Amino acid sequence: MRKILFTLLLTVSITSFAISQSHLDHSPCATAGEYPEWLAAYLENPTHQNARSADDLLMLPITFKSVGNSEGEGHYPTLKIFESLCRLNKDFEPYNIQFYLKGAIEKINRDLYYDHDNFSDGFKMMQSNKDPLTINVFITNDAPSNACGYFHPSADAIVVIKNCMGGSGHTLTHEVGHWLSLPHTFAGWEGMNYDPGEETPLFLDVNGNDTIFVEGANGENCDRAGDRFCDTPADYLSIGWNCSGNKESLQVLKDPFGNDFRSDGTNYMSYSSDACQSKFSVMQVDAMRAYIDFARSHYVFSGFQLGNVNTDPMSSVYPQPSDKVHYQGIELEWNHHPNATRYLVQISRFSFFAAIDYEFIVSGNTVNIGDLTVDKNWYWRVKPYNDFDLCGDFTDFGGFQTFDITDVEEISPNNGVNIYPNLVARNQPINMVFEFNEILPTKVQLYNIGGQVLQDFDIPNPGRQTIQIESGNLARGMYILRLSTAKGQLTKRLTVQ
């Protein structure tokens, strides 16, 4: 039998939940393709030894490209990309294959790519925007044939649509499986709808010329039919499907030899729903690791790997919960976190972050978020991460209130204070002019940028007086002055020149 040749390998994936049909609204298949030549050669020599032990951890780079429309709208949220990568690593963790984020998440704004309905436009998008020596993943709104995603071997890149990304699905795992040389479990049935009412042939016609064996329920032809892995059961279902409690297809299939069976839904390379999938087979894993060793070895990361980000809560410097902050040029600050190299900062008007108003990724421990609406409560949180660990939690630093008072500020009604100057010259005193109309004991604390308390004293009854803090022993830099009373607190940022 001649080897089966297709003109183009464009494989797609399908994800869904057993309860929900939302992802099943997308077609699981675009255009069938040729069986990977590398894999065919590898399977002809099954005793071939891998270059690395199965116990060795293989680290591969992955780069995400978020595609929006020409107005810059519709981008997939950064946090969801992180969750997708965490899901990918969890799926591959049992096989000692992991992926790290390489480079920044690039945003591409073009209608032609955002809703591309043909592979030609997809190819142009990939060729024009992909990075070298990394797994390139483009996240779009739609894809050809309404597919969840596809791997384009000529462009050597992956597309996954927004509705099929996320931390609960396995579409990205499926497509990366293709990138690592794996075919579908139902290889040969792409583009065909299995009909239980018709007799299953022993051979499938391909393009009206070539033929391919059909795998039997008891393993007949397993080494030359379907995906050619004998530890993945026969599967003819090339349209997305839900599974039973046994993780098998609800539909009963019949092989060419008259045997009834149900397709296995646990394999990531099938078209079963997300809730069914949980593994690759042993032979699939051996093939992927061999492919990395002999075809993608130059992708493997072998340098210093940062450890996991510390799971302890982070500490904020400014603002503190319930602080009043001038609405212009607001700068947030927190203490550096162990093993974190970047921080995802989110600002919301809602304490539960139902909507994200502003988002920043920074490498330092401060960010200027610009101007916010006056007299509003705002909430902020920070997620520390590095390229190898994006799966930790946010630290919620609570809320602050914006105001538009540039001179005299109030601790409470009828209890005001004026602090000046904001820009302090060396040896120039910092003045606190109190206008308190009641007895209100006040604690004064001066912090440096690292959160260390430099001065801490109490004023039993500020009344109407001016109290000075000497700056002669302060180094150049930024400081936080906080006044705390039983009726509220006031925080002021000062800069010593």
Image: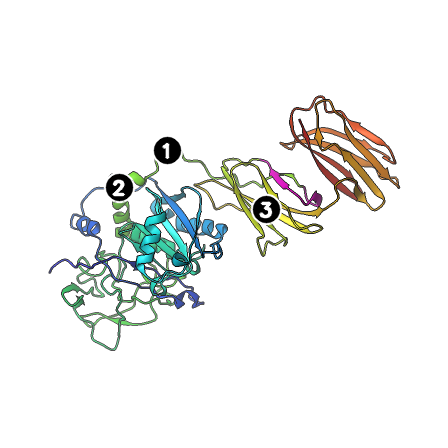
Position above or below: 243 against 491: below
- Kindly indicate whether the residue at mark 3 contacts the one at mark 1 (C-beta within 8 angstroms): no
Magenta residues (range) = 320-335
Of the numbered discs 1 and 2, the one sitting upstream in the chain is 2
Camera-side residue of 270 and 319: 319
At which x and y percent is residue 202?
16, 68
Q: Mark 1 to mark 2: distance in Å?
A: 17 Å
Q: Is residue 367 visible?
A: yes
- Tell me the residue that label 2 is attached to: 293
The residue depicted at 85 percent of the width and 44 percent of the height is 414
Given the current orientation, which residue lies at the most extreme bottom position? 197
How crowded pointer 1 is (Cα within 10 Å; few <14, some 14-19, many 20+) is rated as few
At which x and y percent is residue 490?
75, 40
Write down the quadrant of residue 149 in the picture.
Answer: bottom left
Badge 3 amino acid: Arg
Q: Quadrant of the N terminus?
A: bottom left
- Tell me the residue that label 3 is attached to: 381
The residue depicted at 45 percent of the width and 67 percent of the height is 20
Position above or below: 197 against 324: below
At which x and y percent is residue 407?
77, 39
- Tell me the residue that label 1 is attached to: 303
**Considering the numbered disc 2 on the image, is that residue within a helix, a strand or a loop?**
helix
How crowded pointer 3 is (Cα within 10 Å; few <14, some 14-19, many 20+) is rated as many
